[in-house]
Amino acid sequence: MGRKFVVGGNWKMNGDKNQINEIINNLKKGPLDPNVEVIIGVPAIYLSYVQSIVPDNINVAAQNCWKVAKGAFTGEISPAMIKDVGASWVILGHSERRTIFGEKDDLIAEKVAHALESGLKVIACIGETLEERESGKTEEVVFRQTKALLPAIGNNWDKVVLAYEPVWAIGTGKTASPAQAQEVHASLRNWLAKNASQEVADSVRIQYGGSVTGSSCKELGACPDIDGFLVGGASLKPEFVEIINATS
């Protein structure tokens, strides 16, 4: 089954209007492979601005949201608000939310469930730390994190992209080798076949995230179970176009 390649750019807490204009103008010039779905994860304060200037071939995502529609949750934003400014995606469970802000599997699952119920599409992030990898626990961690998401996603797999991001390869300049990345993606797909369904395993798109650059993207993109990238720092640079076009 053909899975559409999907490339996300997670800007994290970076950018001002001048830099945003540069990034968007660079993406407009492209050219971008029309067979690739492109999503940019924007700081909440700029969601509305980016949505107003972005071309039609690029989707806008929030980088996080809370698990209910409104209320006394100072500093949070809801899926309803994200939709209200025209954005259609949200990134949830990013390793920085897990490690820096202490978000646990069950909270991330609640967020995913509410975002999907509210009509957003979700990039759901999973991945192991260096300590966990060196202890041989990669699969154990990735499967545990994914298992928590199963009831939250339910029958909405067509609205979900999984992003496998080895935490030890984020912002470190280290990248999992194509063989290492492919191995985890293939294992995850096998696990999904057994624990969700064969249809889910065949159709769900699994991105690789972990210091993807213009120089590493082609080899990673050629792996049969890697369906795209979730890109951090490089999504702020002109080489993001090259990464989007990795399979063309």
Image (tube, grey):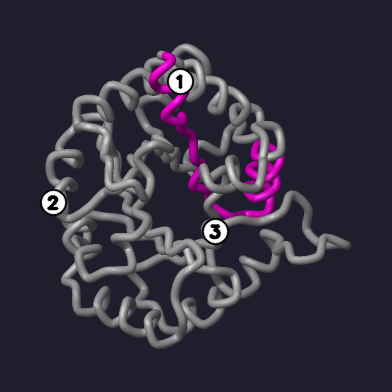
State yes or no: discs 3 and 2 in contact (Cβ < 8 Å): no
State yes or no: discs 2 and 1 in contact (Cβ < 8 Å): no
The one nearer the camera, 220 or 237, is 237
**Classed neighbour count for the residue bearing mark 2: other residues with Cα under 10 Å, few (<14), some (14–19), many (≥20):** few
For badge 1, the amino acid type reads: Leu
The one nearer the camera, 131 or 175, is 131
Q: Is residue 115 magenta?
A: yes
Dot 3 falls on a residue whose secondary structure is loop
Q: Earlier in the sequence, mark 2 or mark 1?
A: 1
Q: Is residue 79 magenta?
A: no
User: As displayed, is residue 93 above or below residue 199?
Assistant: below
Which residue matches tag 1?
192
Residue closest to the far bottom: 18
Q: Position of residue 6 (x, y in %)?
A: 32, 50
Q: CA distance from mark 3 to mark 2?
A: 26 Å
Q: Which residues are magenta?
A: 108-135
Q: Earlier in the sequence, mark 3 or mark 2?
A: 3
State yes or no: discs 3 and 1 in contact (Cβ < 8 Å): no
From the viewer's perspective, is 31 left or right of 48?
left
The one nearer the camera, 236 or 134, is 134
Q: Earlier in the sequence, mark 3 or mark 1?
A: 3
> Closer to the camera: disc 2 or disc 1?
2
Dot 1 falls on a residue whose secondary structure is helix
Which residue matches tag 3?
63
> Closer to the camera: disc 3 or disc 2?
2
Q: CA distance from mark 2 to mark 1?
A: 30 Å
The answer to whether residue 29 of the structure is visible from this angle is yes
For badge 3, the amino acid type reads: Gln
The one nearer the camera, 174 or 221, is 174
- In which quadrant will I find the N terminus? top left
Which residue matches tag 2?
215
